[in-house]
Image (spheres, rainbow, N blue to C red):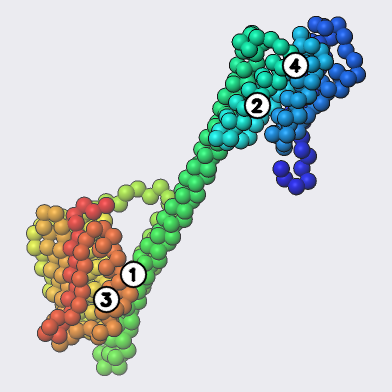
């Protein structure tokens, strides 16, 4: 019982009052007499039920003794209705105690009560009154056990529901975190790619500004186009974030890769691309991953090796798309590239769609990036 809380409830007081009133009315109507002693003992037998939730075992003992005393004074008869009080107390014991304790205690209590009843009010052991008392005692125990089992079941159901809700919240939080990381990675790849191109073209323009103004102007034009494209892709990303009902994306046309090669050729890379197999379009998951692997690989070459020659091979097999990006010997990126975030990001993207990824320096001084993406990866 919590500290400061009353040892009774209104419902328990009401039960005690109802049992007492019924005992008085039944006894007076059946026996035709009622005095202070019987009224006091009946009041104790019934009134103690108000404390049955806080003190179930003491309540059972007190109400059983008082009820039997009342029967002795009234010599049985109509006053037998007072036995409802100990039966209610017995129900409370079964409800508030584990079945391992409630059943032995209840059976022993009923047996003791029957024995005392037989001693003070001699009747046949198998008489109707004793059999009825035993039956009602067993019924009280069974009802209390059923109520306790149902309460435990409901508590378990509520606990499981709360646990499931907590799991759903944790899963939702995890998905939100993963989505934020994905968006951050996309923005990093998009903006980083175009900033690298802008940096290279700006260096070219600065170098040629005095000697070859025409080529410098061309480089500045490329800077303007790259910045405009970067802003456009950033706007597309923000638009997607604002539209939660964004429909499924269509397959990516192969022409997108050609446009990517054109951008890097303008930055000074001498790209030789070769297509093995045929495909008009690439499934969206594999296509996006392939595009970002190609773009990141070429950006790394452009950033770390400068204008050089690069071989790109795209192979469309029946079940996968294989990508190989290899810059020529003598123009390998520095070792720091092998541990940069670009390669880590590419590996994460490829493995996320169930593909394979490898990257590293070649024995003759070049650098190679290879990826295999399953076609139709979700």
Q: Which residue is mark 1?
A: 189
Q: Which residue is mark 2?
A: 109
Q: Which badge, 4 or 1, is on the more N-terminal residue?
A: 4
| Real-space CA distance between mark 2 and mark 4, rounded to the nearest whole angstrom | 17 Å
Quadrant where the N terminus sits is top right
Q: Nearer the viewer, mark 4 or mark 3?
A: 4
Check whether the beta carbons of the residues at disc 4 and disc 3 lie within 8 A of each other.
no
| Real-space CA distance between mark 3 and mark 2, rounded to the nearest whole angstrom | 87 Å
| Real-space CA distance between mark 3 and mark 1, rounded to the nearest whole angstrom | 10 Å
Tell me where residue 254 sits by quadrant: bottom left
| Real-space CA distance between mark 4 and mark 3, rounded to the nearest whole angstrom | 103 Å
Q: Nearer the viewer, mark 2 or mark 1?
A: 2
Q: Nearer the viewer, mark 3 or mark 2?
A: 2
Q: Position of residue 293 (x, y in %)?
A: 24, 68
Name the one closer to the observer, 7 or 257: 7
| Mark 1 surroundings: few (<14), some (14-19) or many (≥20) residues within 10 A | many
Q: Which residue is mark 3?
A: 299
Q: Answer with left or right where residue 211 lies relative to residue 5.
A: left
Looking at the rendered structure, the secondary structure element under dot 4 is helix
Q: Answer with left or right where residue 203 lies relative to residue 39.
A: left
Name the one closer to the observer, 307 or 59: 59
Looking at the rendered structure, the secondary structure element under dot 1 is helix
Residue 271, label in figure: none
Q: Position of residue 164 (x, y in %)?
A: 47, 45
Q: Residue at x 83, y 22 (%)?
A: 41
Looking at the rendered structure, the secondary structure element under dot 2 is helix
Q: Which badge, 4 or 3, is on the more N-terminal residue?
A: 4
């Amino acid at each position: 019982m919590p500290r400061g809380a009353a040892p009774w409830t209104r419902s328990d007081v009401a039960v005690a009052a109802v049992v007492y009133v019924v005992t008085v009315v039944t006894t007076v109507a059946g026996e035709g007499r009622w005095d202070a002693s019987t009224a006091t003992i009946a009041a104790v037998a019934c009134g103690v039920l108000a404390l049955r939730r806080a003190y179930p075992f003491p309540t059972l003992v007190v109400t059983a003794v008082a009820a039997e005393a009342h029967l002795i004074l009234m010599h049985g008869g109509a006053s037998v209705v007072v036995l409802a009080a100990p039966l209610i107390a017995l129900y409370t014991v079964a409800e508030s105690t584990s079945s391992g304790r409630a059943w032995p205690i209840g059976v022993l209590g009923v047996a003791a009560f029957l024995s005392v009843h037989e001693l003070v009010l001699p009747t046949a052991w198998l008489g109707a009154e004793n059999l009825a008392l035993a039956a009602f005692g067993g019924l009280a125990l069974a009802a209390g056990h059923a109520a306790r089992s149902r309460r435990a079941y409901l508590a378990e159901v509520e606990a499981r529901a709360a646990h499931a809700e907590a799991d759903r919240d944790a899963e939702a939080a995890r998905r939100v975190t993963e989505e934020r990381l994905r968006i951050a990675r996309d923005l990093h790849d998009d903006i980083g790619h175009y900033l690298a191109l802008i940096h290279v073209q700006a260096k070219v323009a600065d170098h040629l500004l005095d000697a070859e103004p025409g080529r410098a102007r061309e480089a500045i034009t490329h800077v303007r186009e790259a910045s405009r494209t970067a802003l456009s892709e950033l706007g597309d990303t923000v638009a997607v974030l604002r539209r939660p009902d964004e429909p499924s994306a269509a397959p990516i046309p192969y022409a997108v890769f050609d446009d990517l090669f054109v951008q890097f050729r303008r930055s000074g890379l001498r790209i030789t691309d070769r297509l093995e197999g045929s495909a008009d379009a690439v499934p969206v998951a594999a296509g996006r991953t392939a595009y970002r692997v190609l773009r990141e690989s070429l950006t790394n070459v452009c950033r770390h090796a400068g204008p050089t020659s690069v071989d790109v091979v795209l192979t469309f097999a029946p079940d996968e798309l294989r990508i190989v990006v290899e810059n020529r010997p003598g123009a390998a990126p520095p070792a720091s590239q092998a541990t940069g975030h670009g390669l880590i990001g590419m590996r994460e993207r490829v493995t996320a769609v169930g593909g394979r990824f490898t990257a590293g320096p070649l024995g003759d001084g070049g650098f190679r990036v290879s990826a295999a993406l399953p076609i139709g990866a979700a």
